[in-house]
C-alpha cells in the first residue's frame, strides 16, 4: 500500500486506531466539561480548570507515570478495573489510547469551550420561549452552533494523539504490534544502528498525516461555519 | 386578560409593577430603563420575580405563594425580540417551524401557510438569516413566534433596530395580525408614535413602577404623565373616521367628535376608522379665526387646563368638541394672548404635520 511495508502499515493502523478511539471516548466528556466551564459557576471551578489544563504543562512522562501508578494492575483504579470488569490498560493499546486522550483533553476542552462562550445565549432563551426544553435547546441550538469548535478540538486532539510519546512509552511501554505507535517506532529506529532510513520514512508519514489532519480540520470548520451562515471565513 | 403583580430586585433597580389589562394590543410604555423588558421577561418566564403573580386569560404562569413557576417552554408566550434572534444555522423555513414542531398537533391552530401569507415570507423561505434585511428578519421572527402557537404575543421594541420605511412596514403587519388572528399582543416601546398607533390600552412604567394605565387616548393626552411620555413627543390621540378623499389635491378628510381634520392622502376607504396623533408642538393657538392662512385645520375649542410650571414652554389642554387636544406654545405667547382656562381659542394644525406614523388604522 503506497509503497509501505506490512510493518509500516501495521504501525500506521495502530497509531490511527489509538488516536481515533482516544478522541471518540474523550469527546462526550470534553463537551460536558467545556459546557460546564463556559456556562456555570461553581465552587472549585478554577481548580477543575487547572486540572483539565495540567497535561498541557506537565512533563508527559509525569502523566505517564501517574497513569501507571493509578491504572497499573495493582494501582487503585487499575486493580478495580481488572478484578471487576477484566479490563487491563497497562501495556495494552487501550492504555495508549487513554494516554493520548488525557494529553489531548486540554486542547479539546479549550476549543469547544471557546465556541460555547461565543454563542449568543439569547438564542437559547428564544428557543426556550418557542417551546424547547433545556436539553432540546442544547441539542438543536447550542451544540450545532458550537460545531466549529467541536471539530477543531477533536482534530487537534487527534493530531496530538498521533504524536503522543512520553506518556505512552511510560504507561504502556514500547511493544511492537500492541503499543508501538508511530512516534515510538521512529524512536526505536533511531536507537538501532542503520535504522535512520526507516526512521526517516516513518517521519515523512507522520508529517503527511499531521498535515492531512490539520487541513481536514480547517476544511470542516469552514464548511460548518458556512452552514451557520457565517461568511467571514 | 393579562394580570401582572410582581416584585423583583435587579441590582440597585427595584421593579414593582402591578397592572391588569384586557385589549387586543396592550402597550407597555416607558423610557429606556423603566423596566419594560423586565416585565415581559417575567411574563415569558425568562426572569423569575422575587414575589408576585402573573396570569394570562385566567391561566396562572407564576405565583410565588402557590409555588407555581411554569417553565418558559410551557408558557406559550410568543416572544419577538428587538433584534429578531433568528437561529443562524437554520434557513428561514426551519426557523419558522422550530416552535411549531414542538407543539402537539392538537394545539396547532395557526398554520404555516397562513403565517407565510400574512407576513409575506414566501420568497424568503430558503434563505439564511444572515442574507435578510432587518425588516425581513423581524417578519420571520414574528412568524416564528406565531407558529409556536402562542396564547399571547410579546413584542419587545420590535422596531427599534429598523429604519423608518421598515418601521412603517412592520407596523402594518402588526395591525394585520391584530385584525386577522385573535391573539392578544403586549407591545413594548418607548416610542409614543408606535404606542399611539397600535395600542388600545397603555400601561406606563417609570423607574420600575407602573404610574398609569388606561385607554390610549386618555393616557397619551395627560399632561401629568409628560415626564414619562417625553416632552418632545407629547401630544394627543384622536379617533376619527375617513369621510372624504380629494384625489386632485391628494388629501383625505377625517371626521372626529370635534370637527374635521385634513391630512395628506391616506390609503383607507370611506367609513374606515383611523387614529390620528397630533403632537403638541405641531399645534398653534389663535384668539380669532385667522384669515388668509396656509394652515388647513382650524379647530374651535376652549382651554381646559394649563401646566403652571416654570420655563419658556407652556402646555395647554383644549376641548375641541368631545375630543382633547394638547398644544405647546411659549410662555410669552400665552401671556401676550392672555390665554387662560375657560378661554375660547382656535387650534391650528398644519396638514403636513401628519405623517404615516402618526395616522394609522384603528
Image (spheres, helix red, strand yellow):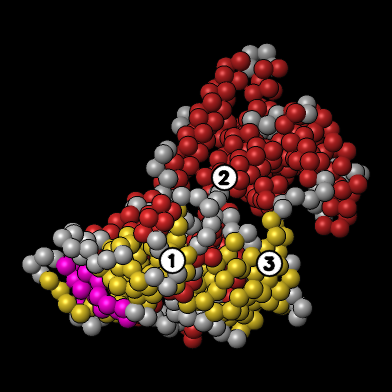
Instruction: Tell me what residue is drawn at x 67 percent, y 47 percent.
Output: A38
| Mark toward the viewer: 2 or 3 | 3
Q: Gap between marks 2 and 3, in whole Å?
A: 34 Å
Dot 3 falls on which chain?
A: B
Q: Quadrant of residue B302?
A: bottom left
Graded by Cα atoms within 10 Å as few (under 14), some (14 to 19) or many (20 or more), the crowding at tag 1 reads some
Q: Main secondary structure of the magenta part?
A: strand
Q: Residue B352's spot in the image, x, y percent?
A: 24, 59
Q: Which residue is mark 1?
A: B340
Earlier-in-chain disc, 1 versus 3: 3
Indicate whether B353 appears above or below B219: above
Q: Residue B303's spot in the image, x, y percent?
A: 41, 70
| Mark toward the viewer: 1 or 2 | 1
Graded by Cα atoms within 10 Å as few (under 14), some (14 to 19) or many (20 or more), the crowding at tag 2 reads few
The label number, if any, that marks residue B16 in the structure image: 3
Determine if marks 2 and 3 fall on one subunit.
Answer: no
Amino acid at each position: 500500500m503506497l509503497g509501505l511495508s506490512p510493518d509500516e502499515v501495521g504501525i500506521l493502523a495502530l497509531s490511527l486506531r489509538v488516536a481515533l478511539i482516544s478522541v471518540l471516548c474523550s469527546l462526550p466528556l470534553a463537551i460536558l466539561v467545556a459546557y460546564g466551564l463556559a456556562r456555570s459557576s461553581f465552587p472549585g471551578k478554577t481548580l477543575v480548570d487547572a486540572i483539565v489544563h495540567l497535561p498541557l504543562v506537565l512533563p508527559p512522562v509525569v502523566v505517564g507515570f501517574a497513569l501507571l501508578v493509578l491504572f497499573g494492575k495493582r494501582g487503585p483504579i487499575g486493580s478495580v478495573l481488572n478484578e471487576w470488569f477484566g479490563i487491563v490498560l497497562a501495556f495494552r493499546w487501550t492504555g495508549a489510547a487513554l494516554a493520548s486522550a488525557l494529553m489531548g483533553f486540554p486542547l479539546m476542552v479549550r476549543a469547544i469551550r471557546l465556541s460555547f462562550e461565543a454563542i449568543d445565549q439569547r438564542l437559547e432563551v428564544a428557543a426556550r420561549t418557542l417551546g424547547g426544553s433545556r436539553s432540546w435547546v442544547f441539542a438543536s441550538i447550542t451544540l450545532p452552533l458550537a460545531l466549529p469548535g467541536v471539530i477543531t478540538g477533536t482534530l487537534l486532539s487527534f493530531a496530538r494523539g498521533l504524536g503522543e510519546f512520553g506518556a505512552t512509552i511510560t504507561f504502556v511501554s514500547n511493544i511492537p504490534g500492541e503499543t508501538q505507535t508511530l512516534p515510538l517506532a521512529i524512536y526505536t529506529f533511531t536507537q538501532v544502528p542503520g535504522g535512520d532510513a526507516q526512521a526517516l520514512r516513518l517521519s515523512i508519514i507522520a508529517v503527511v498525516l499531521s498535515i492531512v489532519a490539520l487541513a481536514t480540520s480547517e476544511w470542516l470548520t469552514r464548511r460548518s461555519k458556512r452552514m451557520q451562515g457565517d461568511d467571514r471565513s | 386578560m393579562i394580570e401582572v403583580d410582581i416584585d423583583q430586585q435587579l441590582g440597585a433597580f427595584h421593579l414593582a409593577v402591578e397592572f391588569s389589562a384586557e385589549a387586543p394590543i396592550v402597550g407597555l410604555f416607558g423610557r429606556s430603563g423603566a423596566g419594560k423588558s423586565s416585565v415581559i421577561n417575567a411574563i415569558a418566564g425568562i426572569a423569575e420575580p422575587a414575589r408576585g403573580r402573573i396570569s394570562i386569560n385566567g391561566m396562572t404562569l407564576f405565583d410565588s405563594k402557590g409555588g407555581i413557576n411554569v417553565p418558559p417552554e410551557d408558557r406559550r408566550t410568543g416572544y419577538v425580540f428587538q433584534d429578531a434572534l433568528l437561529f443562524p444555522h437554520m434557513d428561514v423555513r426551519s426557523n419558522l417551524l422550530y416552535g411549531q414542531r414542538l407543539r402537539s398537533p392538537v394545539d396547532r391552530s395557526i398554520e404555516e401557510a397562513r403565517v407565510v401569507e400574512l407576513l409575506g415570507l414566501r420568497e424568503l423561505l430558503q434563505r439564511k438569516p444572515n442574507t435578510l434585511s432587518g425588516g425581513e428578519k423581524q417578519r420571520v421572527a414574528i412568524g416564528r413566534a406565531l407558529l409556536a402557537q402562542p396564547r399571547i404575543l410579546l413584542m419587545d421594541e420590535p422596531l427599534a433596530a429598523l429604519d423608518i420605511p421598515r418601521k412603517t412596514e412592520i407596523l402594518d403587519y402588526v395591525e394585520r395580525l391584530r385584525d386577522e388572528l385573535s391573539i392578544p399582543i403586549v407591545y413594548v416601546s418607548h416610542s409614543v408614535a408606535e404606542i399611539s398607533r397600535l395600542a388600545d390600552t397603555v400601561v406606563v412604567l417609570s423607574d420600575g413602577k407602573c404610574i398609569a394605565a388606561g385607554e390610549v387616548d386618555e393616557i397619551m393626552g395627560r399632561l401629568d404623565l409628560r415626564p414619562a411620555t417625553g416632552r418632545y413627543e407629547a401630544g394627543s390621540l384622536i379617533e376619527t373616521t375617513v369621510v372624504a378623499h380629494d384625489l386632485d389635491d391628494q388629501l383625505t378628510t377625517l371626521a372626529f367628535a370635534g370637527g374635521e381634520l385634513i391630512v395628506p392622502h391616506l390609503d383607507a376607504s370611506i367609513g374606515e376608522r383611523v387614529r390620528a396623533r397630533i403632537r403638541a408642538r405641531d399645534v398653534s393657538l389663535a384668539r380669532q379665526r385667522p384669515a388668509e392662512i396656509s394652515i388647513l385645520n382650524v379647530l374651535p375649542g376652549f382651554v381646559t387646563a394649563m401646566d403652571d410650571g416654570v420655563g419658556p414652554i407652556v402646555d395647554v389642554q383644549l376641548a375641541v368638541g368631545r375630543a382633547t387636544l394638547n398644544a405647546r406654545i411659549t410662555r410669552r405667547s400665552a401671556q401676550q394672548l392672555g390665554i387662560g382656562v375657560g378661554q375660547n381659542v382656535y387650534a391650528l394644525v398644519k396638514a403636513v404635520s401628519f405623517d404615516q406614523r402618526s395616522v394609522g388604522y384603528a
